[in-house]
Image: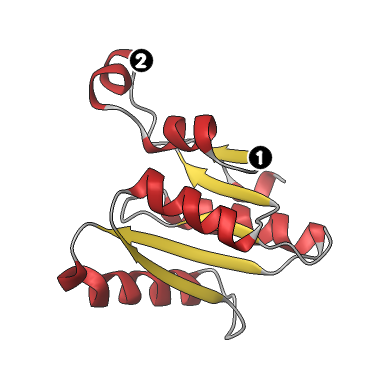
Amino acid sequence: MDGRPVLCAVADDDISHRVVESAAELARRLACDLVLAHVVEDVRSRSAGELLLADATVAAQLGTGVDRRVLVGGAVEELTGLARALDAALLVVGSRGRGALSSALLGSVSHGLAAGAPCPVVVVPAGIDAERG
């Protein structure tokens, strides 16, 4: 995809490993680099975000060549901005599987990214198995 990376949003939740595995598989199939990103609300949480990304890299057996970024701010704004700055080919995110009412009341990062990202967004549902690909 012309050197454009796959950007993977890594959340601190129980489906993040499936999201990372799915993004890694897409990057491999598309012959793209993979960028893992985690957003924290406060700069004091940056080290926890770095640890989360390091753990995700090890768990998915991605090796040392993965670009990892911890962003500070709102998830939708920061991830959209990074996707734009990287000229990302795809943005891969997870969906926690909340019902329609909860998503409507609370908002949803995946919905916000799908609406505002500068590239196609792949939403990995909570129940998907990354091995099916």
Q: Are marks 1 and 2 in contact (CB under 8 Å)?
A: no
Seen at 61% across and 55% down, the residue is 23
Measured as percent of width and height from the top left, residue 112 is found at: 43, 33
Which residue is the site of mark 1?
120
| Relative side of 41 to 66, left or right | left
Looking at the picture, does residue 59 appear above or below residue 87?
A: below
Nearer the observer: mark 1 or 2; the answer is 1
Mark 1: give few (<14), some (14-19) or many (20+) Cα within 10 Å.
some
Which is more toward the observer, 69 or 85? 85
Looking at the picture, does residue 34 appear above or below residue 30?
A: below
- Kind of residue sitting beneath label 1: Pro
Seen at 30% across and 49% down, the residue is 74
Looking at the picture, does residue 3 appear above or below residue 130?
A: below
Q: Earlier in the sequence, mark 1 or mark 2?
A: 2
Q: Quadrant of residue 72?
A: bottom left
Marks 1 and 2, how far apart in space?
Answer: 22 Å
Q: How is the image coloured?
A: secondary structure
Looking at the rendered structure, the secondary structure element under dot 2 is helix
Seen at 57% across and 44% down, the residue is 129
- Asked whether the viewer can see residue 18, the reply is no
Seen at 80% across and 58% down, the residue is 29
Measured as percent of width and height from the top left, residue 85 is found at: 57, 60
Measured as percent of width and height from the top left, residue 102 is found at: 26, 20
Q: Quadrant of the N terminus?
A: bottom right
Looking at the rendered structure, the secondary structure element under dot 1 is loop
- Asked whether the viewer can see residue 9, the reply is yes
Which residue is the site of mark 2?
100
- Kind of residue sitting beneath label 2: Ala
Measured as percent of width and height from the top left, residue 9 is found at: 47, 54
